[in-house]
Image (cartoon, rainbow, N blue to C red):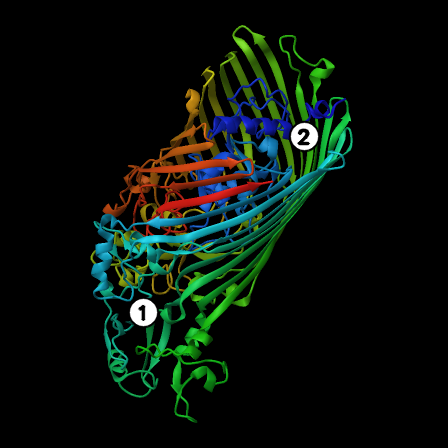
Amino acid sequence: MSKKKEWRGTAFAKKPAVIATEIALAMMASQYAYAQAVQTAERVERVEVTGTRIPQLSVEGPAPVTVISTENIKIDGASKVEDILRNLPQATMDQGTYQSNGATGTALIGLRGLGANRTLVLVDGRRMPPGSPTQGGYPADLNQIPTPLVQRVELLTGGASAVYGSDAVAGVINFIMNDKFEGLQIDVNHSFYNHGQQNPNGIADIIRGRSVTNPRSFVVPGNVTSDGDITGISMLLGGNFANGRGNATLFAQYKVEDPVLQATRDFSACALNPGDSFTCGGSATSFPGRFRNLNTGANLTVADAAGNTRPFSNATDLFNFGPYNYFQRPAEKYAFNAFAHLDVTPTSRVYTELGFHQDHTLSQIAPSGMFGLIAPARFDNPLLSADWRTQLGLAAPGDSTNVLITRRNLEGGGRQDDIRHTSYRMVFGLKGDIFQHWNYDLFAQTSKVVLQRVYRNDFSITRSTRAMDVRTDPATGLPVCQSVLDGSDLACVPYNIWRLGGVTGAALDYLQIPLFANGLMQQQVQGGTVTSDLGNYGFKLPTARNGIGVVVGLERRKERMDLQTDTNFASGDGFGQGGPNIGRAGKVTLNEWYTEAKVPLIEGRRFADLLSVSGSYRHSNYSTGITTKTQGVGVEWAPVRNYRFRGSYQRAIRAANLEELFLAQGTNLFGMNQDPCGPNSAGTAGPTATLAQCLNTGLPAALYGNTLLTNPAGQYTFLQGGNPALRPEIADTYTAGLVFTPTQNLTGTIDWWSIKIQDVITNAPPLTILTQCLTAGQQCARVRRDALGTLWLPGIGQIVALNDNLGGYWVTGIDLAANYLQRLGSYGSVNFNFNGTLTDKWEKEPLKGLGKFDCAGFVGSQCGAPLPKWRHKARATWTTPWNLDLALTWRYIGKSQQETLSGNSLLSAPTDQTDRELPTRNYIDIAAVWTVDKSLTVRAGVNNVFDKDPPIVSNVLADPQLTLGNGNTFPNTYDVLGRTIFVGATLKW
């Protein structure tokens, strides 16, 4: 038996067909290929395709699969794996390099806007480990996948839990790696941004006007020739051994990414306030500070180095926190991978995979400070000037009062979150033939992700209180902390913020504290499958040529999470943290068995060139006491060879992950224009809710309309945390479509899809809870105001929003795709490719019984990040006869409106003109790939050729938590930094 014949028809006989597939894709030079849609006589081997474990022809499958080849990854100029997927119409980013405030250091992607935790990510068909123990970082981290090692990417639409297990609700993303290589390959890639300031909405003029009175905070940036450089170099080395029975392949990569500050783009150089027109807003935690006399309500600030005062003005004194934030985080990455296999007998193969990846990044946001410290002010404080004593009503020794201080630590610099993830992955396996026509694949996979985190330049709440309580040292006559005099804290240094220039380096060293966190994620998976084509035993219908294909498998998975935080994190002593970050730990074990079958019913008959059905089932037992059962069915019908209808149904589940189960309770921040019971931040309008409504929230009548209720920064506090009693989410997913090839050069697909999820695991949006309390008197027990009536000052003021099984989602849409090849005779050929998605409905019910609202085409605190109804990507690639490929790409993102314009009463709220609509965006990209000779290929391109600015909104709508915003826009959706210019070269020997 020849070796080629020996591996034919086995579940693990992937590589020969993969090579054939990639050659075909390269010849067509298409951006996307649809594995079910391309029919060529050469592809006769059966391979494992994403969505099923039954080996089959690559053209088969009842659910749509999108394929991205390595050639098109290079044409896109992708320097990161997130770049490969970011511009796909089906995909949405939850975390990535453009997140700063709230960054987890991970790259998380989901499908259909349903979140990364509802999309299963695989590497070579095996589940990736959880990304990070840090909050919000649990889904698989794409940073663990080196871009140059990716051979292709397959995206499956719809549920696949019966095939792959939990999390495959919206779909599956499978990265196929280049794990069998012969020779040496060096790849170098460099990219940077180029941007000309365009003064969108007159923002540069607004900043220029503010700079007259506050030149320190408001600076108009100039044009950008080059910034945000990303440089990567990788090596791929491989060869056969044991007379061709084995292969070993090694890969290594180093990459460095430079930061980009929001200060460098005019549309993000100030934090924009919502309203009828844009204004530069900011935070009352400002420099040199806002001092509120709690007896009189007067707001003061420091006027000069002598310690004189003046009234605090929102028009001139709010702090512009935007310029300090990163648009693109700096990063340094190392990767090493090894693959090997050996055919130990003619019918058995051992294989192994090893992976090591380290990703080190730094997130930066505006400086910390005192975000609402109530400090004593005493007559005998030697740091107080005569003017301060007068303004605070301190007339004689023994007099004292309390002052609410919000002051920015401008002397100490930005808050920096130093995040390092190191991941390890090992796979060992054995596969082969049990006996003729029965194949097996046994494997064990172990993975570990280690987190090392240091948060720098934050202010200690405890030390700030001590540093503000200052007396005169009777021994020296110098200012000294009361805690030094009474011996409770001998290290305390007075913090002199009562005059300009009074802060010393010693005081900063005392007040600025580092916060440390270390953690790990561990995953162990053991599994095995047995596969057979029963047609070899005569198990096939008389009307079909092919037999029944079956798979039976077992899998055991263990996952463990452990996060340790130091005292500063756990106690919530960091002023800039929004609350405690408490360590957590948990583990779960599950045992599963599953089976699949595919039954060809009719083949090669009139009106039924193909009619087949398939089914899948999985039974899972969790150590948490939960048992789940998932199943799926599919059908394919080709009345004639060139037209094929397909459809599928899946009952999918998503069990609560370790973070959702065991997250310690702690506070976080959410965005809101103003407290409905207080005035707007500018003080020009009163409460939007009635007194009776505000009484529902626990607000004393005397505080109705109090200016202290509204945080000028638009940030408020909510309590979040895990819940060990969570039930799995249940989803019903449907797809129905048509694949058509009316001519040899044209292939098209149209697929309808529907995903309906019940018992969604989430925390209710804090704004929804507050709105329900105000308007319906419901959920009011979850609204907890502090003694001053606020929901934002440090303390107990908060909205309680713990994890629970709440409401549901229902998403429907249509995918359209086409690929056309036009030959040009002696001038080569042009390939036209199109991929578009229409999101027809994106309904959300945040709380059971509350009612639904449709988020398709909207953005906001309830709907989340922008969800345009229509997105597409179209490409024309000219393959010339001169070894040169030229590509022109058109990316389109439809408009999104502010959710308050939906007409749904659940989303009813005042609409600011500045945030009414995110207009459509059209991006044009160009690229060229020149094969100089057999050993050298060079490439270059420009994405966003015309340097289109992103849509601009207020920093309240572009909230980093609720809508994944950053810098007054949405970098996970739009091109935010201007043109991307890239060059690269690949050398092969």
Q: Nearer the viewer, residue 12 or 662?
A: 12
Q: Is residue 542 above or below residue 409?
A: above
- Distance of label 2 from label 1 (alpha carbons): 64 Å
Q: Going by the image, does 247 lie left or right of 327?
A: right
Q: Going by the image, does 666 lie left or right of 707?
A: right
Q: Position of residue 827 (x, y in %)?
A: 42, 24
Q: Going by the image, does 940 lie left or right of 435?
A: left
Q: Position of residue 617 (x, y in %)?
A: 62, 28
Q: Position of residue 493 (x, y in %)?
A: 44, 80
Q: Position of residue 267 (x, y in %)?
A: 29, 52
Amino acid bearing label 1: Phe
Amino acid bearing label 2: Phe
- The answer to whether mark 2 and mark 1 are in CB contact below 8 A is no
Q: Residue at x 58, y 33 (%)?
A: 161
Q: Is residue 404 above or below residue 934?
A: below
Disc 1: which residue: 287
Q: Residue at x 59, y 50 (%)?
A: 335
Disc 2: which residue: 12
Whether residue 760 is visible: no
Residue 325: image tag: none
Under circle 1, the secondary element is loop
